Amino acid sequence: MFALTGQFTLDGRFGAFGGAFVPETLKPALEELEAAFRQMTDDPAFQEEFLSLLTEYAGRPSRLYLARRLTERLGGARIYLKREDLNHTGSHKINNTLGQVLMAKRMGKKRVIAETGAGQHGVATATACALFGIPCEVYMGAEDVERQALNVLRMQLLGTKVIAVTSGTKTLKDAINEAMRDWVAHVQDTFYCFGTAAGPHPYPSIVRCFQSVIGAEARAQILEKEGRLPDAVLACVGGGSNAMGMFSGFLSDPSVRLIGVEAGGDGVETGRHSASLTAGIPGVLHGAVSYLLQDDDGQILGTHSIAAGLDYPGVGPQLSYLKDSGRAEFLAITDKEALEGVRLLALTEGILPALESAHAVAQAAKMAPQMSPDSLLIVNLSGRGDKDVHTLAGEVG
């Protein structure tokens, strides 16, 4: 059974990565957040309410589904899908937002802000705020507002104000910048609901803790179905929330390969991509040390991905540590390959994955035929593709 206690560490560092490089104005807020996190995750009443929300409201546990026709089409390893797309709101993001907005409520905060890329975290935050009756504002890059119009409307219907960010590349990085500025100005009464396992301490630990339900469930479910652990688990990587959620269940199982799949865009060799771990170098972005896409002067490079949720020049500090320690492997899948992943899963299983999740599907499609039929893969299907129909229409219509 999933439980919050013991699922996290709070030193703020993962080897050389992590930390909290923020303005002095935010340090008291981060200390308050860490103290509240420690207190609440040790509080049986908080745990009971959070776990009840996951079950009764979000619809957990999510299914671990054997994709039989996909396996038959590819040959080789049997492929299981962790169906986070079936959660309420359509992605894994609801696991984290229910936890963080519940914290905001107990801390007495009057307002919640968030950033979003693909809109899934924005929708999940708007949903949790509507549930708890807390006003919510979400920052979203103007480019993402356009390509994720359905999720913008969903947030608005849930009573959230969506603020289009027109600075920089008009994507997730810039949305986080603006949300941080808002938080600095309204830190006394505002809770920043951070969407991924990145940012300053304690956010990477908080997000991983609330998302660790994915890996805990998957580990128990595969043992029940197959009587053994998988050979590998795969997840797409933008900031890293769904990857850390899945990987956390298998970190202590050295026989299980942890494979993160980044956005290769037009190809890593072209420079038009978002593959921070594949092609980046360590630096500081959004309050933490992690792998970044930056030039020789430390300026953040522009990024590209067909998947808005992966269109980010940084990544979470724990994933950076897992790369350097050799515990996890990271690969890049191009836009074209991700689109092929969408088609493959739609035609074989009747499942339309999010473009983000399709990166992991595409990598599994490369690996499975090279493995024996006794091998097992688990792909974290982090979200559903309804939000991407406008983008898909432009690519396949």
Image (cartoon, rainbow, N blue to C red):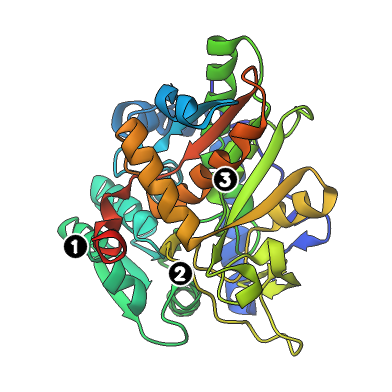
Separation of residues labelled 3 and 1 (CA atoms) = 32 Å
From the image, tell me which residue sits under label 1: 153
x then y, percent, for residue 107? 44, 52
Residue type marked 1: Leu
Q: Give left or right: position of 298 versus 110.
A: right
> Considering only vertical position in the picture, is 349 above or below 304?
above
Which image quadrant: the N terminus? top right
x then y, percent, for residue 137? 31, 67
User: Residue placed at 44% from the left, 58% from the top?
Assistant: 193
User: Residue placed at 30% from the left, 69% from the top?
Assistant: 147
Residue type marked 2: Gln
Residue type marked 3: Gln
Asked if one can make out residue 376 in the rendered structure from this viewpoint, the answer is yes
Front-most of 75 and 55? Answer: 75
Which image quadrant: the C terminus? bottom left
Badges 2 and 1: C-beta atoms under 8 Å apart? no
From the image, tell me which residue sits under label 3: 363
Separation of residues labelled 2 and 3 (CA atoms) = 44 Å
Dividing the picture into quarters, in which one does residue 246 lie? Answer: top right
